[in-house]
Amino acid sequence: MSKIMKSLLLFCITAGTMLSSIAEASNIDTYRDLLISKKYTIKYENVTPEERITNKDKITLTGNNSMRTGNVSRLMYKPLECVVVSDGADRYEEMGYDGFISCRLQNENGTYVFTKYNEGQKTAVWGTKKNTVAANQTNNIAYIMQGDAFGGNDMTRFLNAILPDNLKSAEMPSYRQVNSGWLDNGLNYVDYRSDGSNMEAIRYYFNGYTLVKIASAQFIYDDKGQMQARRCIIKVNEFSPTPAKEYLSLPAGVKDATKKPKKDEGDN
């Protein structure tokens, strides 16, 4: 092979590697920009949710303290289906399984926390009482300090990992990109990792430019100093730049019992 051909081959390989790296980096950049702009719709399924140690949170999950204990098992160790919608200051998060959905809606009135659940062939809502909700004042200081949440703790950690440190919770460890490449099945990926006593490796999978899956491996030291490992797999069904407006208002037929602030005498 001539020196010219060898040089051209080397150039092509180098250029291909550079373009691959640029494409993989731009994948992460695109989704990071969406998170920073706070305009998106995310729908995903946590295939490997965290285990629940007790049933004490059954009331919070269902919003209905008459739920029979035997039914709580329907919520345990099951894949969690989650939706997160953001349109600037307006925000909605839900997570649940098998018709029990814990919801949080934030808008100019404050923050609504309620539960949707199946009642026969219909969906009922429990807030302050059945089909009635009321907004509490949003704790903006805590919200700024804790950063954005994305449904479950796992997805919150994974998406905050790609954000600049000044835009996420101070309790979040720093993550850095350590690798990227292509798989035999045609997917490309970007790897992030946190260091320290508790280490985590996160891989973001892309089909072309579309985020389709996130997987992680955590290595955590327990109270006895023994290392425990945990894996997590997130199936991303949608991550679009368009906020789904239908989620940013209360469900139809639900009464808003939020107390309006009284006007001062000088107000017209």
Image: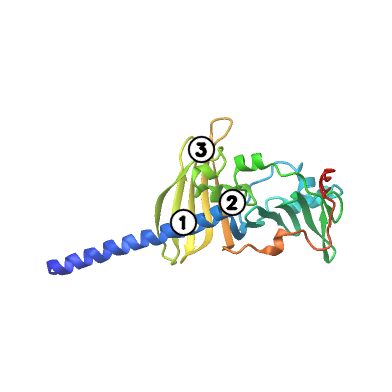
Depth check: 102 or 135 in front?
A: 135
Depth check: 264 or 192 in front?
A: 264
Please state the horizontal and vertical placement of residue 77, each as a whole percent of the image. 68, 51
Mark 3 residue type:
Asn
Kindly identify the residue that appears in the image at 82 percent across and 44 percent down.
266
Image height of 93 relative to 121, above or below: above
Depth check: 254 or 123 in front?
A: 254
Mark 2 residue type:
Met
The mark lying in front, picked from 3 and 1, is: 1
Residue found farthest to the top: 224
Q: How many marks?
A: 3
Residues at marks 1 and 2 touching, judged by CB atoms closer than 8 Å: no
Q: Name the residue under label 1.
A: 29
Q: Mark 2 points at which residue?
A: 155
The mark lying in front, picked from 1 and 2, is: 1
Q: Earlier in the sequence, mark 3 or mark 1?
A: 1
Q: Distance between the residues labelled 3 and 1?
A: 26 Å
Q: How far apart are marks 2 and 3 (CA)?
A: 18 Å
Mark 1 residue type:
Asp
The local crowd at label 3, few if under 14, some if 14 to 19, many if 20 or more residues have their Cα within 10 Å, is: some
* Label ID, residue 198: 3
In the picture, residue 130 is in which quadrant?
A: bottom right
Give the SS element for disc 2. helix
Give the SS element for disc 3. loop
The local crowd at label 2, few if under 14, some if 14 to 19, many if 20 or more residues have their Cα within 10 Å, is: many
Please state the horizontal and vertical placement of residue 101, each as a whole percent of the image. 74, 55
Please state the horizontal and vertical placement of residue 27, each as a whole percent of the image. 46, 60
Image height of 84 relative to 137, above or below: below
In the picture, residue 90 is in which quadrant?
A: bottom right
Kindly identify the residue that appears in the image at 71 percent across and 50 percent down.
76
